């Protein structure tokens, strides 16, 4: 007997599920929980199959019959209504996934997956480049819909404001994000790879540095006789003697200085390559630190070179640059990074030190050879001798 609206409404749950049939394969199933679900039982290619038509009362008896009749019509045309429903669900799921997997969402996933491999400074630079140059324009675009012309349009917009180097670096970040998306099964190609050669070529920039002995001598004497603050004076001397990266110098803490072993132990969290680095301290370097120690060791932040207000922040990144300008060395001649170039040039040209020893001390790793497997203590004895030789050489130039 066919069902009626009142009969369906009055169906009550029992201890076990049960079914009440309507006609032509349509029935309603009542669960012990009280849920009532419409089902259509049919055969396709000789196999019995079921098609879910929704729950009562959201789907009424009349609507369930209409769905059944539509399914029967499809069966008459050789279409499996259950398989068709599954395919539609998959398509809807893919479409929803595509809409949800925007460029910004995947970029932030990539960022979180890689952030632990970077220094805090570099991580901050990466996310700022994305937030300032890509997210506002293509952040909400599904990553699978970003084609080379769209990405190139964003990069050329950066170029138009005169930031060709930024455009190149943003392109590199985009490439890394798309390769992450490929590995995640979200896209099949990297549009950043397709636009190589379409961006403006950026001429190689060389950090200005004094590399001739007479010029270095003038710099050293200028520092020795400067009227700058004692902390800045020590920072300049320390930079010349250790030739570490400027950011690493200004954020050095007293807890990193091991006077007993005459070593500056820089933790991996502060190194560009995320590997702990050892800097042997020459006798002259240790003497400078001992002079400075009473002034800054117990200040907030424990920085060797705190900011002038000593409020828990390290020396500003512009302090050493400003000091060099005050001493009469223009930006075309010398920059804070120039101490590294200065040392590298003279050490290589001295002919006394193996290039590998110099490169390790500069914290450069060779990615193409076994030397790329970084060992913080590699060549440590040779580096101790080299750092003392360098300090003595600077004294001789004076």
Image (spheres, rainbow, N blue to C red):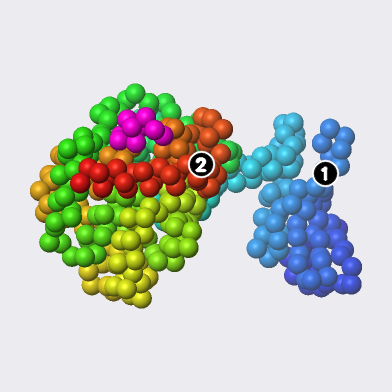
- Who's the residue at 33% across and 61% down the image? 287
Residue 244 on image: x %, y %:
35, 49
Q: Is residue 356 magenta?
A: no
Q: Is residue 352 magenta?
A: yes
Between 144 and 398, the one nearer to me in the picture: 398
What secondary structure is the magenta-colored segment mainly?
Answer: helix
Q: Residues within 10 Å of mark 1 (few under 14, many from 20)?
A: some
* Residue 376 in view, yes or no: yes
Which range is magenta? 345-353
**Quadrant in the rendering for residue 257:** bottom left
Between residues 55 and 105, which one lies in front from this camera angle? 105
Report which residue position mark 1 lands on: 49
Q: Is residue 334 left or right of residue 115?
A: left
Can you tell which of label 2 and label 1 is closer to the viewer? 2
Which residue is labeled 2 in the image? Answer: 379
Q: Position of residue 377 (x, y in %)?
A: 53, 47
């Amino acid at each position: 007997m066919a069902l009626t609206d009142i009969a369906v409404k009055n169906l009550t749950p029992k201890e076990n599920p049960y079914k009440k049939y309507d006609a032509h394969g349509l029935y309603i199933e009542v669960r012990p929980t009280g849920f009532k679900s419409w089902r259509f039982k049919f055969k396709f290619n000789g196999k019995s199959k079921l098609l879910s038509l929704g729950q009562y009362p959201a789907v009424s008896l009349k609507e369930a019959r209409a769905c059944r009749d539509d399914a029967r019509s499809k069966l008459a045309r050789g279409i499996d209504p259950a398989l068709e429903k599954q395919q539609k669900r998959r398509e809807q799921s893919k479409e929803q996934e595509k809409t949800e997997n925007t460029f910004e969402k995947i970029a932030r996933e990539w960022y979180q997956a890689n952030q632990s491999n970077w220094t805090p400074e570099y991580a901050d630079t990466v996310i700022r480049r994305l937030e300032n140059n890509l997210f506002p324009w293509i952040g909400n675009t599904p990553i699978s819909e970003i084609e080379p012309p769209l990405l190139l349009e964003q990069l050329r917009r950066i170029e138009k404001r005169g930031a060709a180097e930024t455009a190149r670096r943003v392109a590199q970040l985009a490439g890394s994000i798309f390769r992450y998306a490929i590995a995640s099964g979200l896209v099949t190609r990297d549009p950043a790879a397709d636009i190589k050669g379409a961006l403006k070529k950026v001429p190689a920039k060389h950090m200005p540095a004094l590399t001739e002995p007479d010029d270095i001598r003038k710099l050293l004497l200028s520092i020795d006789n400067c009227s700058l603050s004692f902390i800045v004076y020590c920072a300049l001397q320390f930079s010349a003697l250790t030739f570490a990266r400027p950011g690493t110098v200004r954020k050095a803490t007293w807890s990193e200085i091991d006077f007993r072993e005459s070593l500056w132990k820089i933790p991996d969290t502060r190194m560009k390559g995320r590997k702990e680095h050892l800097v042997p301290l020459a006798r002259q370097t240790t003497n400078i630190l001992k002079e400075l120690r009473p002034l800054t060791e117990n200040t907030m932040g424990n920085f060797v070179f705190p900011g002038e207000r000593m409020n828990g922040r390290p020396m500003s990144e512009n302090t050493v640059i400003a000091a060099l300008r005050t001493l009469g060395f223009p930006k075309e001649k010398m920059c804070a990074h120039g101490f590294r170039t200065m040392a590298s040039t003279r050490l290589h040209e001295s002919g006394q030190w193996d290039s590998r020893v110099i490169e390790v001390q500069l914290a450069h790793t060779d990615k193409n050879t076994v030397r790329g497997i970084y060992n913080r203590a590699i060549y440590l004895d040779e580096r101790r001798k080299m750092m003392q030789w360098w300090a003595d050489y600077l004294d001789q130039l004076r």
